[in-house]
Amino acid sequence: MIGTYAAVVAVCVSSLAIGQAALALCGQRRWSWLAPAVGLAAVMAVCWGTVRLPGDGVISALAILILTLAALGFLWRRLEGGGEALGAGWPVALAALVAASLPFAVEGHFGILGTSFNPDMSQHLLATARLADGHSSQLLHQGYPLGPHSVVVALHKGLGIGLVQGFSGLSVAVMVLAPLTALATFRELAPLPRSAGALVVGLTYLLASYFAQGAFKETIEALVVLAFALALREATAARWCELPLRFLPAALLA
């Protein structure tokens, strides 16, 4: 349990910090709820780009740690609306975390969900273990996208948690980041309908059903698609129109 939630915290904090820093570099100094998805996209790209360097994931963990600390330092005293965002975000994040924990509570333990329905995780764990040991695998040879796997390797090498806990933590983190991203649609509403709307959009039945069967790629894809649509919407909003790099967040997600 501790390893899973440690992975959730690591993925969420790094995604939020790196994502908002990327948006700030685009000229958006006020907090944006595009940050969770943009940050996760950047984390996956950095991990995949560094996981095969010497150290077999150690450099990935160090790179994400350095980028997160640099992002927090860059945002210090530059970020506008941080307190307001915290007030709007923590109820949604907490509710989403509780909802994402329900399948584990039903099972009575933490681990890989849906193994009796979807056995694909065995191949993903094998490919991730091979990646963490600096070896190739069938999925790697096939050109399979191993960005999420490299994030798990970075969690494994950086936090010392198992690969199963890493995948569980990444999956739960996505279920938290999706409703937070959906807050971009409801920011003008009162607190209760805003939180309810974000949770309904971020935890749709299709997303929840994929999560319950241990499918992590589909939930990440859903988060990215949601954020991509919102990024295009934000780029045409009045407060973004004067920013020359306003379409960069959508490009990062793509």
Image (spheres, grey):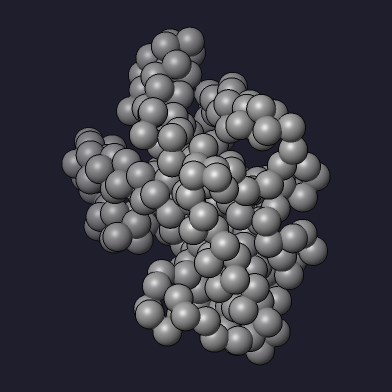
- Give percent across and percent down for residue 214: 52, 46
Left or right: where 141 falls relative to 102: left
Rendered residue at 69%/29% (across/down): 105
Rendered residue at 45%/24% (across/down): 199
Q: Is residue 200 visible?
A: yes
Query: Between residues 96 and 18, which one lies in front from this camera angle?
Result: 96
Query: Between residues 54 and 167, which one lies in front from this camera angle?
Result: 167
Query: Between residues 111 and 189, which one lies in front from this camera angle?
Result: 111
- With respect to residue 144, does 253 lie above or below? above
- With respect to residue 123, does 174 lie above or below? above
Based on the displayed image, in which of its 4 quarters is residue 68 positioned? bottom right
List the single residue furthest toward the front: 116
Left or right: where 17 falls relative to 185: right
- With respect to residue 248, does 174 lie above or below? above
Q: Is residue 37 visible?
A: no
- With respect to residue 218, does 124 lie above or below? below
Query: Between residues 117 and 82, which one lies in front from this camera angle?
Result: 117
Rendered residue at 74%/38% (across/down): 109
Image quadrant in which the C terminus is located: bottom left
Left or right: where 124 falls relative to 28: right
- Give percent across and percent down for residue 233: 23, 39
Rendered residue at 39%/44% (across/down): 223
- Give percent across and percent down for residue 72: 63, 53
Image quadrant in which the N terminus is located: top right
- Give percent across and percent down for residue 47: 55, 70
